[in-house]
Amino acid sequence: MKHRNSHLLVGYWSRLRKGRDVPDQTDVDPRAIKRMLSYVFILDAADTSRPVYRLAGTSLCDRFGIELKGTNFFSHWDAQSRAGLAALLRQSLATRQPVCLSSIAATAEHGMVELETILAPVSFGSGQPLRFVGLVQVLSDPTPLAGRPIAYEKLVGSQLVREDEPLSNIDVPPPPMPPMITEGRSHPRAPHLRLVVSQDRPVTLHCDLDAPMQRLIEALDIMALPVERTA
């Protein structure tokens, strides 16, 4: 995790457990997370192939340009990211661990930013976790958004979160953004990206990236693994 608020949310989630595997949604006190509340959301993942926003903060809705309540969490993610996300949601619920998502988001005008999303599993009236309390934060310079809503998001990395993970240095100014993309969303073959998860056989997501997107990922210090070739 890179953003301080991500660590704060996971720490709060951990304190709420009180010896349980996961806290209940009713334990969440909005006043305790007031400083980040406008970017917090509740996700119903009883069906991990179609998770639905139950609640979403006003600033988060503004970021995507719509009222998110009742909409599909996958609706603004690209098609290749969705299968990997569904597997990550299932893994997080099964292991009772929060998951951290790294992504690249773009407006319709191709202004791009790096996002960090935290999804922490919670129950709702029973011991079985079927929901998430989540948080979305911008890691890079938000200027490229320029008040325009996010239209498109691509998953570039993930990890299950350990509670003792140290806080990354977030005081370093973000790197400059690369030239804006002029092509559409159809990308040629490019390096694969591996999702980093805490299991023996991690989920792997294959993303097709064009040259400008590849330069953006390199500028944001997101490592793309080389394509493995077989004889």
Image (cartoon, rainbow, N blue to C red):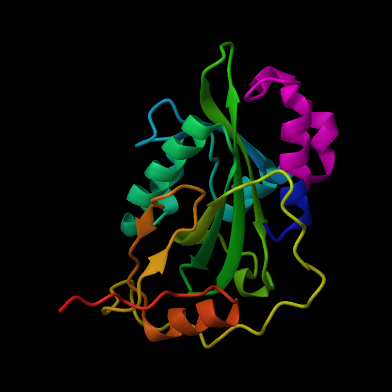
Residue 23 part of the magenta-drawn span: yes
Question: Residue 162 at x, y = what percent?
Answer: 66, 46
In the rendered image, the residue lying farthest to the left is 231
* Magenta region: 8-37
Residue depicted at x 71% and y 43%: 163
Residue depicted at x 47% and y 31%: 94
Question: Residue 1 at x, y = what percent?
Answer: 67, 57
- Residue 60 relative to residue 15: left or right: left
Answer whether residue 77 is visible to the viewer in this image.
yes
Residue 26 part of the magenta-drawn span: yes
Question: Residue 183 at x, y = what percent?
Answer: 35, 81
Answer whether residue 37 is visible to the viewer in this image.
no
Residue depicted at x 42% and y 48%: 85
Is residue 14 or residue 199 the one in the foreground? Answer: 199
Residue depicted at x 77% and y 40%: 11
Quadrant of the rendered image containing residue 63: bottom right
Magenta span: helix, strand or loop, mainly?
Answer: helix
- Residue 166 relative to residue 92: left or right: right
Quadrant of the rendered image containing residue 79: bottom left
